[in-house]
Each structure stands twice: as C-alpha cells, then as structure tokens.
Amino acid sequence: MNFVAWKMLTGDRAKYLGLIFTIAFCTFLLENQTSIFAGILKRTGSQIKDVTDAEIWVMDPKTEYFEQTKSLKDTDLTRVRGVEGVQWAVKLFKGSPVARTLDGKFAVSFCLGLDDATLTGAPRKMVLGSWERLREPDAVVIDKAGYDLLFPDEALQLDRTIELNDHKANIVGISDASAPFVSWPVIHTRYSQAINFVGRERTQLSYVLVQPQPGLDPLELSQRIESQTGLRARTREQFQWDCVVYYLKHTGIPVNFGITIAIALIVGVVVAGQTFYIFTIENLKQFGALKAIGVTNWRITEMIVLQALTVGTMGFAVGSGLCALFFLITLNNPPTRGLVLLWQNMLGTGVAILFVVILASLISIRRVLVLEPAAVFRG
Amino acid sequence: MNSEFAVQCRGIEKAFGNGGGKVLALRGVDLDVRYGEMTLLVGPSGCGKTTLLSVIAGLLNSTAGEVTVLGEQIERLPGRQQILFRRKNLGFVFQQYNLLPALTAAENGAVPLLAAGISRREAIGEAKRLLSTLGMRDRGDALPKQLSGGEQQRVALTRALIHQPRLLICDEPTAALDADTGQAVMELLAQEAVRPERAVIVVTHDNRIFSFADTIARMDDGRVVSVAEEPGFRSDHVFVPQPEVRQELRV
C-alpha cells in the first residue's frame, strides 16, 4: 500500500509541490537563521581560535570576553611563568588603532601585538607572504578581508604602506584570519611595534599566552595559575565560550534571532501542518473507500505517516540545498564570511521539521481514524 | 443458520441519535440472501436500504438483531478480524465509483490485492486481465478522469471482483450512468459477478435493472415489506408481502 500512498501524494502535482515548497521554505528559514546566529556568536571568539600555539589565556580577573581588556602589569608575566607546570608564557597585546591607506581610506582595526622573540599567535593560514617577515621593521600582516576593505577592487600585493595611528606600517603578509565579530581588519605585528602604533600607556600587557608542559591538562594548569596569581586563566575553548556567553547575555542578538527562529517554526508548523491537513481531508473519501474495502486503520496510519515523511524529507532536502547554496554564494563576501551551514543546525532543523510533519500527520490521522467507512455509501 | 444463504438478517434494528432525536432507520429487518443469486434491495429514498447494506457489510453495527454473513456473525467479530473478514470476503461497488484519482485503472482495480499484501506487479497484472475480461483491455493505464462513467464503473467492478469475494455489495451501481451504460454495466455484473459460490446484493432505485434480479426485496420505512423470488425476474412482477407484513396490512 506504500505504492498507493505515494501515488496519492504525487498524483496532484500542484499540491505535492506546494507541500514540498512549504517545508523547504521553513527549512531554509530555520537553517539560515540558526546558522547565521551561531556563526555570529562563533565570530566573537575568532581571534582566540586563531591562536593555536598556546592553550591558556591569562587576563585580568574582571575580563569577561576578548574585546574587554584591562592591562596587566609586566610583573604578572613573570608571576605566571613562575607557576609550576608552565612550559612557557609570552605576552600578547590587543589594541584598536585606526588603519589608513595613503589614499585616505581608513578603518578601525584589531591590532594584535605578538611576542617579539617567538611571534606566538602569528596567523598560520596565509594567503600571500610569510608571517616570519614580521621580524622586519614596521612589518604587519593584515587579513584578506581587511585588505579588501582598505584596498577595494585591488589585487593582493605585498610591501604596500598603511598608517596605523599615523605610524607607517609595511604589509609583509596577507592572512586568512577568521572573521571577527565586527568587520574590522585584523592586523598582526610584533608586541613592541604594536604598542608603538597604539601609543604608550602606563601598562600595555593585554593577555599572557601560556603553554602547559607536555602531559599537563590545560584546565588543571589554568586553575593553578588562578589560585597562585589571582589572575583569570582560561583554556582556549573556555575563553571562546566566555565570549559567546557574554554576547548572549549582554546583547539583543539572541532575542532578535530567537524571534525570527520562533516565527519560522510557528509559520512552518501552521502552514505546513495546515497544508498537509487539508491535503488529507481532501482525500478523506478515498481513505473511507479504502477502509470499507478492508484496509486497516494501522495501514492507513502508515500511509499518512509515509506521505508526511516523504514531503518532510523532500522539503528538508530542497530547503537544506537552498540554504547551502546561500552560504556558498555569500562565503567570500566580507560581511558574511565565516558564516556557514553547520551540521548541528541541519540536525536541529531536521528534528524540528520531523516534529512539524509528525504533528501535521497526527492531526490528519485522527480525522481519518474516526471516519466511518459507511460514509462512502452516502454518495 | 442455513448454509444456502450468504446473508441472513433477523430482527435487525438500527437507531441513530438518542433521546428525543432518536431515529429508527431499521425496524426489525428479516432478510435472506442466497448464494448464486443477485438480490436487489429496492424502495424509496430514506427507507433504510443503505443502512441495511452498511450493517450487512460490517460498516455499521446494528442496535438489535442478528446478522450472519457467510456463516459468521460479523458484528461479533473483533474489530481487526472484522476488517480482515471484509477485505477477504466482500467486494464493493459504490454509486460514485470512489476510485483513487491518482491511480490508473489497473492500479485502482488492484487495490484489494495490494491491501492483502500481493506484490504490485502481480496485483496490477491480475487487474489488467480482469479489466480485459470486462472489455477494457486498452484502458488499463488510463486515469479515472480520462474514463467515461461506464468505464469507471467497470474499473470499480474490477476492484470489487479481483480478490474473488463471496459477497458483492453494490450501492446504486447505475445511478450515475445513462440508461444504455447502466444496462451494459448490469449485464457485466450479471455475467461476471453472479457465481454459485457468491451472492450479489444491489441497492437500487432504477427499475430498469429489475430484470437482472433473482430476488427483489422491497423496503419501506425501515423494514423489508416484501420479497419476490424468481430467477430472471421481470419488472412487472407482483410482489408478495412477507407473512408478518401481510398481517400488518390486514390490521
């Protein structure tokens, strides 16, 4: 009877395609919005994620997320190095100088000052040039999106000059840094160079990057650093999550996206549910005839669930395909780079769509099950 | 119960609603339907023909009385067994055909076999063979909307007969057809459906098809008021009221 259910479903092309379109639209909206939401939140920890050399970030005890820094004292670096289990610890500076081209185009940037000796935290994914050239005087590495922002429609080219807070800087490399929360250029340079660009303050040290000794759990070491120095120490993953949680708690992002996602779900349930319900009700007489002929309620339930799962699967596939296409098209656009269709969002949307179609089919099944087969004799 | 009868109804009553709104659709129906015969249930609209048909088919439960179908007291069968009994032993022809519009003629005809778990290829092959017997050899792949009323009723007849039921139930099979097509469908029904091991019950208003009946049971006001039995019945036949009805008429 699965064959009969399939033919009943696909017999009316317009209704069949309408059902698939409804589910596809719902899928697209859910996957798109949840992926953008997750992608934007992931961006809050992009610069932490890109530092793959060190496992632990040490910061002022009141620091809650990456953007919010209060400078540490230079002696804090020494104190961290003194904690047992620390293989090495280096300093990291984070500032926001204005980057300006010779043509006058400018943008506020993220400037990361890396330890002069080791260049720990240098961008490992390079599009052009080498991060090792950061040792040269006035050398900076800028990310590709930042380069495109400052030099729109121009080919990538090394040894171009920009100004950082009126200090000359030479581009020695172009990196593929992860997109930051706001679309600012990400500039890497040496620590000593960075504080020169930003301007001297009483203290300059934003973070201390720490690598535990081999075999030592980073979580255990971070707890040890906290207890011995009074500073805040977080593993790389913890710090990324701190940023996500901060933005969830202190911005309107979750509310805005939450409303959109909720509307997508409600519209999906109502429209898809109602469309499928009407589809079943229009076939009520046919189901009545099948019941009279001797098709059991259980078999009819299977037929309706099969129809629901079929449109659900087709709609989900089409919607996911459209969503993947959307992210493929927008992948290289600076404002949307780094936003991708995550498998977790696909899975979650799949579960939501399954819920929608099962709910719709259950409501429909109820009408069919209470249908008296004798109704078929009433003309 | 006598085994020469496919259906035996004794004192069947059927009420709809309750309290002041209670309506008695059947008021003590007695009826016997023999194997190998075509029995017509006739009578005015609202006299209870379709309700009786539904009770005999196990689609409605009676309020009182006893109905035996093919030796089984169908109302006493548990729900699922009743459905399986119907699937195996009963065939239906509906007034409005009730074909599935998305299925071809052959696929529609094959539905009872598909419901019984027969493979699609085998079921559709069998349906095409039967359609061919009923004069629709080249129409097996047509959709219902591409068929005339007579052709659709022949597809419905295929669906009703394909699993070789022992009781065929037809509800106004000619009502939606013109006279000639109705005549042709009834000829087919008489030729192909009536078998010694099968009984056929036809509910109809159409006195042009009375000539196909072996027995005609006339109903009025929820009762069988007369049963006329004669092979090759003619429409001018004089009805003989049943004894209890005769008694009522005398009163």
Image: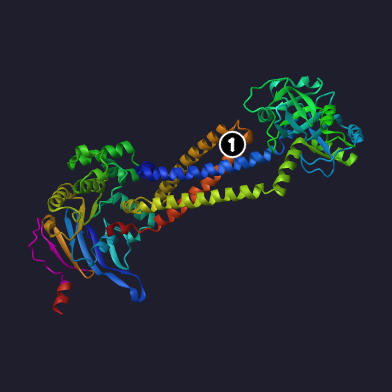
Image quadrant for the N terminus of chain A? top left
Tell me where residue A305 appears, x and y as whole percent: 44, 47
- Picture layout, residue A100 above or below residue A366: above
Quick one: A13 or A132, which is closer to the camera?
A: A132
Chain ID at mark 1: A
Residue on which disc 1 sits: A341
User: What's the image's color scheme?
Assistant: rainbow
- The structure residue drawn at horizontal position 64% and vertical position 50%, both measured from the top left corner, is A255
Residue occupying the far bottom of the picture: B251
Q: Which SS type dominates the magenta stretch?
A: loop
Residue B226 lies in the magenta-colored region: yes
- Residue B124 picture quarter: top left
Tell me where residue B131 appears, x and y as whole percent: 21, 41
The answer to whether one can see residue A122 in this image is yes
- The structure residue drawn at horizontal position 63% and vertical position 36%, both measured from the top left corner, is A335
Tell me where residue B180 appears, x and y as whole percent: 12, 51
Q: What is the secondary structure assignment of the residue under circle 1?
A: loop
Quick one: A91 or B9, which is closer to the camera?
A: A91
- Picture layout, residue B239 above or below residue B93: below
The answer to whether A219 appears left or right of A1 in the picture is right
Q: Badge 1, how many Cα within 10 Å: few under 14, some, many 20+? A: many
User: Which residue type does callout 1 highlight?
Assistant: Leu
Q: Which residues are magenta?
A: B223-243
The answer to whether B116 appears left or right of B136 in the picture is right
